Amino acid sequence: MYSTLLAPIHSFLQCETPNAWIEKAKQPEHLQLLLTDHLICELKAAQTAMWLIRKYAVDQESGAALLAWLAPFEQFIYKKTGSLAELAKANKLSKTIVSKSNSNYSQDLIDKMVLLIKEEIHHFYQVLEIMTDRNIPYENISAGRYAKGMMKHVKTHEPETLIDKLICGAYIEARSCERFAKLAPHLDDELNKFYVSLLRSEARHYQDYLALAEQVAGKDISERVKFFGEVEAKLIASEDEDFKFHSGLPI
């Protein structure tokens, strides 16, 4: 049913999720960890998009409005303050986002990233709602190696820094989409439907990141995309002591 949607994802990624990861992820005793890490990943995705537009594309007042928008969700994760009901009202941006007068980057970056933030925050709420309904408490967990393993290869001079970060974002979103699709059939009906419902937005997020990277570069970036694809595949296919949503081969 979703083969057309997933075909570009499978072509983009340089390896599939190992079956051993699926076998571990589908075990009921790992559900709390999986949902908790998924919750945190949604916040991190929103934070990444927000960092990009605040650093590269918007004025100071807009940057402050963006920070205020995400604050309730960050406070829930980092300080365990707030409630599901309060967060339900929080996914609203308080003002129009205005681009910097001297920005080299187009309104397209702002538009794509603001939409991504809205969707990731909505997904955050949906995951938390599922956890609440199942009496699964939120507990802090350590970060996995995945995102850090890619980001350490990001170049330190512009515009290459931005290009590399956008490419990394594309791989993270593509892997999320691939993993949702592969794991969904092994879960209960509610989680199956939920993960399948995320496929279209995750697939579009990967495409948006990649399109923005090409737009910023203004040149062929296929070699850089291939490089990060190799890095990402190694992280997914190599042994990993830490089990997370984006972790590698379980030991």
Image: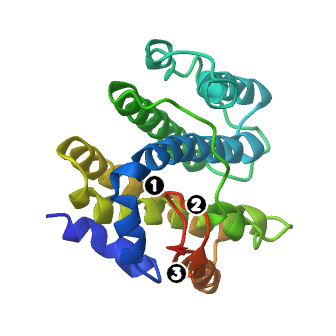
- Residue 232, given in percent of the width and then of the height, sits at 58, 75
Q: Which mark is residue 205?
A: 1
The number of discs equals 3
Mark 1 or 2, nearer chain start: 2
Q: Which of 106 and 196 is in front in this view?
A: 196
139 is higher (above) or lower (below) than 248: above
Marks 2 and 3, how far apart at CA: 19 Å
Instruction: Examine the rendered structure and indicate whether residue 90 appears above or below residue 16.
Output: above
**Which residue is drawn at the image coordinates 62% and 31% (left, top)?**
77
Q: Is mark 1 on a helix, strand or loop?
A: helix
Q: Of the residues tagged 3 and 1, which is closer to the observer?
A: 3
Which of pointers 2 and 3 indicates the residue nearer the eye? 3
Q: Do the residues labelled 1 and 2 touch (CB within 8 Å)?
A: yes
Q: Name the residue under label 3.
A: 237
Residue type marked 1:
His
Left-right relation of 108 to 62: left
The part of the image, by quadrant, that contains residue 129 is top left
The 10 Å Cα crowd at callout 2, few under 14, some 14 to 19, many 20 or more, is many
Kind of residue indicated by mark 2: Gly
Q: Closest to the observer: 49 or 235? A: 235
Measuring 54% from the left and 65% from the top, which residue is drawn there?
247
Viewer-proximal residue, 189 or 125? 189
- Badge 2 vs badge 3, beta-carbon distance below 8 Å: no
Query: Which callout, 3 or 1, points at the residue further toward the start of the chain?
Result: 1
Residue at image mark 2: 169
Point 51% across, 15% down: residue:
83
In the rendered image, residue 52, in percent from the top left (x then y), is placed at 69, 48
Q: Picture quarter containing residue 127? A: top left
Instruction: Return the x and y of residue 105 as percentages of the image width and height.
Output: 68, 52
Q: Where is residue 112 in the image (x, y as percent from the top left)?
A: 51, 46
The residue carrying pointer 3 sits among few (fewer than 14), some (14 to 19) or many (20 or more) residues within 10 Å by Cα, namely some
Label 2: element kind: helix
